[in-house]
Structure formats: structure tokens, C-alpha cells
Amino acid sequence: MNLGRFPRLHFAHLPTPLEPLTNLTNELGGPNLYIKRDDQTGLATGGNKTRKLEFLMADAVEQGADTIITQGATQSNHCRQTAAIATKLGMKCEVLLENRTGSQDPDFTQSGNVFLDHMFGAGIRHYRGGTDMDAAMAEVGEEVKSNGGTPYIIPGGGSNPIGALGYVNCAVELLNQAGEHGLRIDHVVHATGSAGTQAGLVTGLDGTSSGVPVLGIGVNAPKEAQEEKVYDLACRTANKLGTGIDIKRERVVANCDYVGDGYGVPTDGMVEAVTMLSRLEAILLDPVYTGKGMAGLIDLTRKGHFSKDENVVFIHTGGSAGLFGYRGAFADTFAEVA
Ligand SMILES: *Cc1c(COP(=O)(O)O)cnc(C)c1O
């Protein structure tokens, strides 16, 4: 696998640390839990989109773009990271935010990631849940062109074969770290949404013949649809890499039992997981992705899904800025403790 031939800009702090979750491991009684700190990618409070944007923004620069257009949910971490890097590169950024939960809580509509989008000077447009966001981006693209600009459209979550290269790179980085630490990784677990993270990881872990299984904990779609989305993107990513990596369908596994009532809607398991990680490990998860992903990991652990002597790496894909948009979801928990 040769990632070196793809244009890339370097602005993430890499490699991100790989740390043991000693207190959580003791609390749950095993397996041995580790966390890869992709919440510490350095840019604008960090997160997984930064790795994807290293490749996507290099492509945008090559194409002579001066305006980046992207979309996400109201509390999108992807939009926040995109707005930050566009600013750093001297480009304009138009972010299109879809209110998928319909919440009108001012924390949700104005604080957290939305506040940071403003901080980075992005143009922000709000849309109702259910809007065709790809069509909306195309419309904004036409508007930019008619004003003499050169737009570059990044799909939601930065999930296309270019963006997924960022997680092929993460897979290679993780295997190198495990090698240095003498750590045998039995499972990689993370939250999966727009699919680029898992597609890149599976492609990277298979392209290096590591055989390490990846479990994506879904935050949105049902299992079958999520796995198909990841598999399709993994095949296209492998194809882009062009090394004859054959992605096996059975290597793409998602568990979508922890979504709750829908994307971005809090669950009790999420609140418990976020609170456990903050109080046991002083690590901030997020309410939309890593909170539900960790809720899945904790529940599966309690149900004996992993053997006690296995080593499980949770990839912390970031998003803690979103906590400020979801303050209300934690009110009951905090009241109990007070
Ligand atoms: C976007 C995101 C994910 C999901 O990654 P995908 O590549 O979209 O599947 C996970 N965690 C956080 C914090 C995110 O912002």
C-alpha cells in the first residue's frame, strides 16, 4: 500500500497517542481496553475528520478551489473541522447545517460546534431535517460560481475514497504503534456514521494483511444498510489505492443496537458512557458518536462478548465540543450527584 502518491497536506498532530484505559478496564473487569486518541488530532479541538481533510483539502488546493462547501447535522464535528482548516488555508467555507433532531434548544442550535463554526468565520446556513443536502450543496456551489468563486464540495463527513485514505493511514499508524508497544490487538471498536472511518480502517487493516477485526457501532442507520455503505466505500477506497486489495464483505461488521431513537438523540447508555469516561479516565467523549460507540463497547463487555484476556482498542473519534450543545441531556445525572 502506497499512500505517498496521493496529495496530502499535513496539519494533524500525528501519531495520536495510544493509551491504556486502566480504570475503565478495572471497573468492567476486562478485557484490556485501550484508546487511540484521535480526539487529539490538534486542529480546532480535534477529531477524526482532520485525518480525512488532510487528503481532501490537498485535492481542493490542486483543483484551485477558493471556497469549500460542506454539510452536516447542526452539531457537526466535520463542519467545524472543515471550517477551521479552510480558514487556515485562506479559503472561504460555507457550511450547511441540517437540524436532524428538530431540537430548538439554544445550546443545540447555537453553542458547541455551531459556536466554533462562527469562531472560524464560516458562512452558516441552517436547513430543516429531511432536506436533500447534496442538492442544497450543489445549489450553493452554483451561487459561488456565479459570484466568480471556485467551489470544492466535500460530502457529509468527508466520506468518499479520498477522505477514507485518512483512515487507511490511521490503520497503518495503529499497527506500527502496537508493534512498538508489543501489543497484540484483538479488536478495534469505534463509532460509525458516514462510513469513511470504518471503510478506511478496514481497507488499511486488510491491505496490510493484519487480520485485525473492526467493529463499527452505528449511530444512525440499521445494521444492514450501515454495513453496505461501509463495504461499498471500502471497495472504492481499495480500488483507489489500486493494490489489488480484495475487501471481503464479512470483514465489514456493524452493530446498530445502540442508536436509540435516532441520530443525535440522546440515550441512557450514551449518558452513562460519557459520564463513566469523564469520571474514571478524565476523557471527554461526545453525545452523538463516541458516547453511543462507548455505550456499545461497555454493554458488549458486560454481556461477555470479549474474552477477559483480549486487547480491545477503542478509537476516540473526537466530538467533545458537541457536549456543550447537549448540556440538557446530562442535567438529571448531574442532579443525582449533587
Ligand atoms: C463523524 C464522526 C464519527 C463517524 O465517522 P464516519 O467516518 O462519519 O463514519 C465518529 N465520531 C465522531 C466524533 C465524528 O464526528
Image (cartoon, helix red, strand yellow):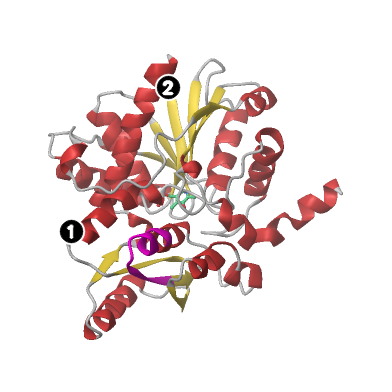
The residue at 45%/44% (across/down) is 41
Q: Which residue is mark 1?
A: 62
In the image, is residue 182 above or below residue 176? above
Residues in magenta, as a range: 84-96
Left or right placement of residue 96 versus residue 242 in this view: right
Compared to residue 265, the image places residue 296 above or below, namely: above
Determine the residue positioned at 61% across, 44% down. 284
**Image height of 43 relative to 143, above or below:** above
- Residue 197 in picture, x, y percent from top left: 37, 45
Q: Which sits in the foreground, 133 or 167?
A: 167
- Element under label 2? loop
Q: Amino acid at mark 2?
A: Ile
> In this rendering, does residue 250 appear at all?
no
Magenta stretch: includes residue 91: yes
Instruction: Count the numbered circles shown.
Output: 2
User: Which residue position is annotated with label 2?
Assistant: 185
